[in-house]
Amino acid sequence: MAHTKHRKQSTRPTRGAARSGRRTLRRESPTTVALLTDPADFAAMRGYRSFTFDDHATYLRQVEGLLRSLASRGVHVRVGPFDPDEYAEYCAGTGHDPDSSRSRTRYAADVTTTGPTVPYTGQPLALLVTELEYETGRQATWERASGILADAGDCSGCGDDLDRTSFDRASQALMRLLEAAGPGHHHLVCSVPAEGTTLLAAMHARCDEQGMVHLAEAEALVCCTVLAAGFAEDSPGGLVLRSGAGAGAPPPDRPDEVRGWTLRDGWLQPLTEAQVFNAYCTDAESGDPVPPEPGVVHRPGFVLPPPEDD
């Protein structure tokens, strides 16, 4: 009887399969890039011999080329800011040599893990820089407002934790305001004077016909924290709400409406129509009048009932 020998099949992957697997892993491994957006920051980094770029414009073109190359291979990329001063402190604290590309790589990985970042989705570099600067400013605002809340202590009258109670009141105020505003697209701007500066936060929201409020959580968190800091500090801040039917120019029979409130006694107190007009049509820095925006009407703020346990 004839016997047929069976060759044992190898379980080791072929070279082609191995290369394909590595390419798949590269696509599924996110990449972070720390970007020197400011020419002054770029000039500061030129003090390191290992930093070989001579021109900021050329550097930005090279970074954009890198981002496009990564995105074309399906790699998820996030971009964060590169701060030379923070980088020097980072190297001093970790013992890394600041004049080393490996140290810059470590810093970029760490800073983009904990700091502000934006995803690269193919947008022009100028737009990416604008988005990154906005995100950086938003996180800085949230950190300052959070610090104010952390230092607020307890209420002298009832002994409650002002950090927690102020944030709860701010959350209720924003939700009641949006629910009262009704269906449409809404843009809120909250400003609170604090520590010699002004904390400024903005958020977008949409209310549907069923009364559901849809919003971006990151924006809402910052706006709520700033408003809470104003409540905790009893600051004379303000909030402006602009409402419209949707994106773009509103229909002729429904112009955008602007309403306003001031922070007083731990709650939002409505402004009159004249006060809203003055606040919206005055330059915040110079105090000079600003012409009214076409297609916008100014309305008085509506009364928001305070919390039941006020």
Image (tube, grey):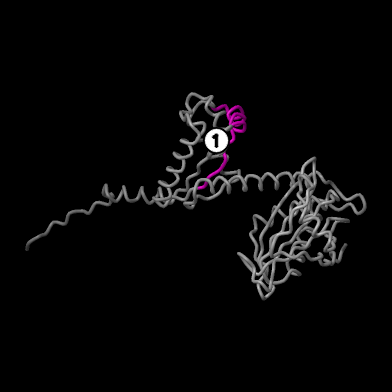
Q: Is residue 185 left or right of residue 108?
A: right
Of residues 157 and 233, the one drawn nearer to the viewer in this rendering: 233
Q: Position of residue 261 (x, y in %)?
A: 81, 59
* Residue drawn at x 74%, y 68% as measured from the top left: 181
**Which quadrant does the N terminus fall into?**
bottom left
Q: Position of residue 59 (x, y in %)?
A: 47, 36
Q: Is residue 271 left or right of residue 111?
A: right
Q: Quadrant of residue 133?
A: top right
Q: Secondary structure at mark 1?
A: helix
* Residue drawn at x 66%, y 45% as measured from the top left: 137
Crowdedness near tag 1: few (<14), some (14–19) or many (≥20) residues, C-alpha within 10 Å: many
In magenta, the rendered stretch is 78-96
Q: Position of residue 265 (x, y in %)?
A: 88, 56
> As drawn, which residue projects farthest toward the bottom?
210
Q: Residue 86 in magenta?
A: yes
In this figure, what is the number of numbered marks?
A: 1
> As drawn, which residue projects farthest toward the front?
291
> As drawn, which residue projects farthest toward the right?
157
- Disc 1 marks a residue whose amino acid type is Tyr
Vertical position of residue 223 compared to residue 36: above or below: below
Q: Residue 252 in magenta?
A: no
**Which quadrant does the C terminus fall into?**
bottom right
Vertical position of residue 211 compared to residue 129: above or below: below
Q: Which residue carries the number 1 mark?
A: 107
Q: Is residue 88 left or right of residue 235?
A: left
Q: Position of residue 219 (x, y in %)?
A: 66, 55
* Residue drawn at x 47%, y 45% as measured from the top left: 31
Q: Is residue 256 left or right of residue 193?
A: left
